[in-house]
Amino acid sequence: MKITSWNVNGLRSVIRKGALDWFRINQPDVICFQEIKAYPHQIDYSTIHWLEEYIPFWHSAERPGYSGVVTFTKEKPVS
């Protein structure tokens, strides 16, 4: 099982810059992003359509533009 973790300091910026290619190529089983600074509805999946095969678990910060984490898994966790 491949598990990856990255403090992105802004997920939307990382997506715009095309910096997620490593994840597309290596297809880890679990992807963990910290400091996403975004809400699920703010993510444009058209440029990262390959992430749609993952199950997302979002925990965005209450304050807009601040912190938050998201975990993407290929399989739904048991617990």
Image (cartoon, rainbow, N blue to C red):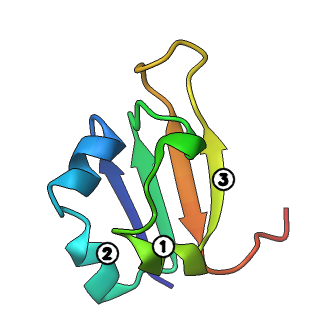
Q: State the image coordinates of residue 3 (x, y, percent, origin top left).
A: 45, 71
Give the answer, above or below, for where 72 lies relative to 1. above
Q: Quadrant of the rendered structure where residue 17 is?
A: bottom left
Crowding near the residue tagged with mark 3, few <14, some 14–19, many ≥20 C-alpha atoms within 10 Å? some
Q: How much space separates mark 1 and mark 3, taking CA atoms? A: 12 Å
In the image as oriented, which residue stretches furthest toward the top?
63
Crowding near the residue tagged with mark 2, few <14, some 14–19, many ≥20 C-alpha atoms within 10 Å? some
Which label sits on residue 59?
A: none
Observer-side mark, 1 or 3, equals 1
Which label sits on residue 57?
A: 3
Residue beneath the point at 30% across and 86% down:
26
Numbered-mark total: 3
Give the secondary structure at mark 1.
Answer: helix
Residue 33 left/right relative to 10? right
Q: Which residue is mark 1?
A: 51
Residue beneath the point at 33% across and 68% down:
47
Q: How much space separates mark 1 and mark 2, taking CA atoms? A: 9 Å
The amino acid type of the residue labelled 1 equals: Leu
Q: Quadrant of the rendered structure where residue 79 is?
A: bottom right
Give the answer, above or below, for where 72 lies relative to 38. below
Crowding near the residue tagged with mark 1, few <14, some 14–19, many ≥20 C-alpha atoms within 10 Å? some
Give the secondary structure at mark 3.
Answer: strand
Q: How much space separates mark 3 and mark 2, taking CA atoms? A: 17 Å
Q: Which residue is mark 2?
A: 23
Q: Nearer the viewer, residue 48 or 68?
A: 48
Cβ atoms at labels 1 and 2 below 8 Å apart: yes
The amino acid type of the residue labelled 3 equals: Phe
Q: Earlier in the sequence, mark 1 or mark 2?
A: 2
